Image (cartoon, rainbow, N blue to C red):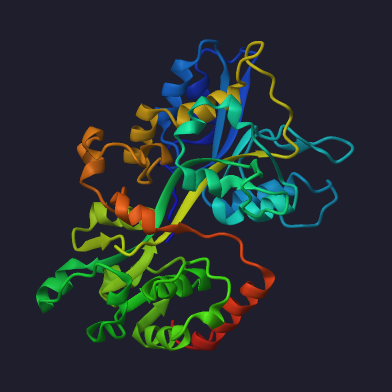
Amino acid sequence: MDRRSFLQGVGVLGLSQALAGCNGSAREALRVRLLKSSIPPQILDKFRRSLQQPARLDFAPEPQLGQLFQLLQNWQRPAASTQPQPQTSWPFVSRNRQGAATGVPDLVTLGDYWLAQAIQQNLIQPLNPQQVAAWAQVPSAWQKLVTRDRQGQVAEQGQVWGMPYRWGTTVIAYRADKFAEQGWAVPTDWSDLWRPELRDRISLLDQPREVIGLTLKKLNHSYNTEDLTKVAALRSELQALHQQVKFYSSTNYLQPLILGDTWLAVGWSTDVLSLMKNNRQIAAVVPRSGTKLWSELWVRPAVATPTAASNSGQPSLSEQWLDFCLQPQTAIQLSILSQAASPAVVGRDRATLPSALQKQPVLLPAPSVIEKSEFLYPLSAKASEQYQALWLAVRPTSSRG
């Protein structure tokens, strides 16, 4: 199940025309390639109305983050490239006679998972946070996530390569009806995955950083642990967890939960929240010892045409958009409508937030949980080999699921 999907019925041309309105002849244009459902149309329309000067806004959605990353790669390739092209309805991307990409959007959605690769492959260019007034409102953990050196590694003195605009977590979803029927205590933390009564009743993501990471968290270690050999009992804990698992998948992990083939699943908060809206049998919890955070970012393609300032000395249209996404009211509306929280609501007084956010701990976990949670950072080559070797040892590809 894809944790990201767009509001139905809004096509590329329809959305662009609706936002441009009568401004089709405006000189300024903002072209954005975004992930479906990550920005609701109401917010785009609000941004258009907030502009002091008319502008044409071209926003086109893609269903998968991987496709957006592939597009960043394609815009760097010569026209004769034999690499497969992603299916797309993006109306203005083409190449000139020299094979250079033309009409590349000003901003693109990118998942933090791809950020290091995008920097290493010279697919994106740094942003200027000094032109984004609301950058100061971004919590330090999110600022750290996008401040990297040119090798893609987190660096305190690095440059800002992306602007986080929404985030979520890895959560535990479970069949509340089944737990109630059995009189079982509901899960609250990662350690519950090892409960004997849940043997063969669990579906997990088929990703080593996720599964090894949650096991590390159970053992009071970081998701970003570099040397796994120093974590006592890690292999035995993973082997014990494997015996609990009936199904591994990073795309269909919730289907067995819906059907009752499994009673507990580990998955991404946006998927789970979408499921909970239409299925009251499903409940979810963010593990109280902390979990993995993920974030979606605005990045600027390396080959994008330089954006002129809207007025002399003023932020460009793209910089105005970045700032708008982090404004307090936009952040609240985005968090409620997109089922993923804005970083700008983290740290705010909960009493001042709408009840839709106060009463949804899966969407906006308690501050104590957020403080214990982590983004995944790039591992060294040696550490990556350790993770892969351990994963193959405890979860052979020919076994379960």
Q: Is residue 34 left or right of residue 328?
A: right
Q: Which image quadrant is residue 191 in?
A: bottom left
Q: Please state the horizontal and vertical placement of residue 240, each as a whole percent of the image.
A: 38, 88
382 lies above or below 126: below
- Residue at image coords 46%, 65%: 251
Q: Please state the horizontal and vertical placement of residue 273, each as a whole percent of the image.
A: 31, 53
- Residue at image coords 36%, 68%: 266
Q: Is residue 187 left or right of residue 248?
A: left
Question: Where's the N terminus, which quadrant?
Answer: bottom left
- Residue at image coords 15%, 69%: 177
Q: Please state the horizontal and vertical placement of residue 195, each as a whole percent of the image.
A: 26, 82
Q: Is residue 64 left or right of residue 86?
A: left
Depth order, front residue of 343/302: 343
376 lies above or below 313: below
Residue 189 visible in rendering = yes
Depth order, front residue of 259/31: 31
41 lies above or below 313: below
Q: Which image quadrant is residue 163 in?
A: top right
Question: Where's the C terminus, which quadrant?
Answer: bottom left
Depth order, front residue of 391/159: 159
Q: Please state the horizontal and vertical placement of residue 144, each as a whole percent of the image.
A: 54, 47
